[in-house]
Amino acid sequence: MQADLDRILFDEKTIHHRLDELAARISHDYRDRELTVIAILNGSLIFMADLLRRIPLPLKLDCLSVASYHGETESSGEPVFRQVPLPDIAGRHVLILDDILDSGMTLAAIHEKFETAAPLSVRICVLLEKKKARVRPIKADYVGFQIADEFVVGYGLDYMERYRNLPCIGVLRKGLIAQTEALS
Ligand code: IMP
Ligand code: MG
């Protein structure tokens, strides 16, 4: 799998070191509030597992399955909610965890839905944030790393459901994407 990468952006050690810092900030910010984490599947699975084990607070965990890519490398712009009903977040301090903030469509749609469900607060934490103009104006409160606007895989992020189990994050070889897109 690693041979399919053009280059590695963040190795396992770098990711874990950054998670230590993120977890420390989150633990401090929520020290006297009960935290409800909502992880957006499937992309945030590995990030979630590694981050939450670094947060020594009592917390509740729920997952939400939302997809917007449908096997392409550009967002289709239409997030589909696969799990209904939404977790009960009324009266809760919610922290949404996602793998990456790209066009912003997914997180904006989730944020919008959540606002109508009477939470006490909603914050967003993403492992990666692409530096680009967003389709929807949305800001993450906690960001692992900022990256350029290129397609990355690994550490939970996929290309056509592959590469999620790579321990590092890297840029997929362009030829590889062109090849699969020509076949489909
Ligand atoms: P957005 O709605 O465009 O912000 O994209 C949200 C989802 O698209 C993310 O949660 C990812 O699952 C997927 N995505 C966006 N950029 C990438 C990427 O570079 N690699 C893999 N998946 C991505
Ligand atoms: Mg994906």
Image: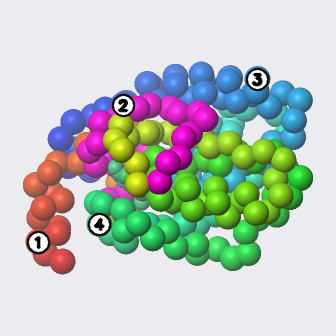
Q: Amino acid at mark 3?
A: His
> Are the two marked residues, 3 and 1, in contact with CB atoms closer than 8 angstroms?
no
In the image, is the residue at mark 1 within 8 Å of ligand 1 by its beta carbon?
Answer: no
Q: Position of residue 176 (x, y in %)?
A: 15, 57
In depth, the one of 55 and 28 nearer the eye is 28
* Helix, strand or loop for the magenta stretch, by majority: loop
Vertical position of residue 176 compared to residue 28: above or below: below
Q: Position of residue 18 (x, y in %)?
A: 52, 25
In depth, the one of 18 and 94 nearer the eye is 94
User: In the rendered structure, which disc, 2 or 3, sits on the residue that comes first in sequence?
Assistant: 2
Quadrant field for ligand 1: bottom left
Mark in the foreground, 2 or 1: 1
Determine the residue positioned at 44% across, 31% down: 145
Q: Amino acid at mark 1?
A: Ala
Q: Which mark is residue 10?
A: 2
Q: CA distance from mark 2 to mark 3?
A: 25 Å
Q: Which residue is labeled 4 in the image?
A: 72
- For the C terminus, the image quarter is bottom left
Q: Which residue is labeled 1 in the image?
A: 182
User: In the rendered structure, which disc, 4 or 3, sits on the residue that comes first in sequence?
Assistant: 3
